[in-house]
Image: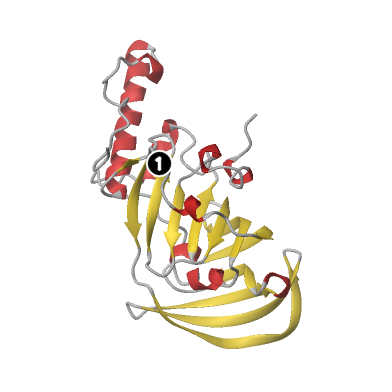
Amino acid sequence: MMKPWWQNWRRSWWLLPLAAAVGCVEQTPRLSGVGRSGFIHPPKPPEFLAGSACFLLTNAPGFSARVTLDLPGVVDGTKHVTGTLLGREGHFLYSADKENSFIWFVTSHVGFILNEPLQAYAPMSEDPHVTNLVTTAITPGTESVNGHPCKKSDLTVYLGDGATDLLTVWRATDLGDLPVRIVSSAGPARYTANLENVRLEQPRLGLFVPPEGFSKYATAEALMTELVSRNATVRGVKRDSGRGPDDLPPGSPGTSHRGVGGP
């Protein structure tokens, strides 16, 4: 059995199946966010990565970690999302289990969404960016969080649109003050991010670019629109003839790997 990509990244980029991408096309409706008007809202990088807390993750020269995100839920009050995060010099690769993968550049506030079923990627950007970060309180002593001695502090983050976010951060003193827990209690989104199984190491810079051979789509919306279209085609073929996607003749809708702006 092939190991998950995040267990193989040290050996070769081509061993990365990007398990964080959509597990199969049948999951598309849940991930694409098709609204009533038909407009597709593509997944976005997690708030802790592309939002107000992003600069806190640049303390270490390089690291890998498992991330658990606790988000406000609609039904049970909390939604748990787990994934893997690689970081180096402000470059990040984040893969949420059974969802999409994101490459993100903190300083430029841009990145890519990657989708394994399509063998494709598209550029993304997020605004507003962080304009200032002020430490408002430091708790004396240390606390043990996720197996590390940590210093706890409260911060106020100012964003480019005039909004603010309130963060509570636990920085691991044995990991160069890398945060192992971040809690956002205000701002655009509220969440708790826990970093576990942290390893201080430098992933290859080649990991932070889309894989060679992936088709480029002009926008994330175009990529997700194509995924929805292929999913609908596959479901239609199964319903009408009982055939699967591998039975489609060459050139049939839903079998091409070319995308907008692709080779």
Q: Nearer the viewer, residue 59 or 81?
A: 59
Q: Position of residue 243 (x, y in %)?
A: 38, 13
Seen at 39% across and 50% down, the residue is 113
- Location of the C terminus by quadrant is top left
Q: Nearer the viewer, residue 102 or 25?
A: 102
Q: Which residue is mark 1?
A: 212
Question: Seen in the image, is 224 located left or right of residue 106?
Answer: left
Q: Residue furthest top?
A: 241
Q: Position of residue 116 (x, y in %)?
A: 44, 38
Q: How is the image coloured?
A: secondary structure
Q: Position of residue 8 (x, y in %)?
A: 61, 42
Question: Seen in the image, is 106 located left or right of residue 139?
Answer: left
Q: Is residue 250 above or below residue 72?
A: above
Q: Nearer the viewer, residue 56 or 242?
A: 56
Q: Is residue 158 above or below residue 178?
A: below
Which secondary structure lies at badge 1? loop
Q: Position of residue 218 (x, y in %)?
A: 25, 48
The answer, for residue 40, to whether it is visible in the render is: no
**What amino acid type should be assigned to the residue bearing mark 1?**
Glu
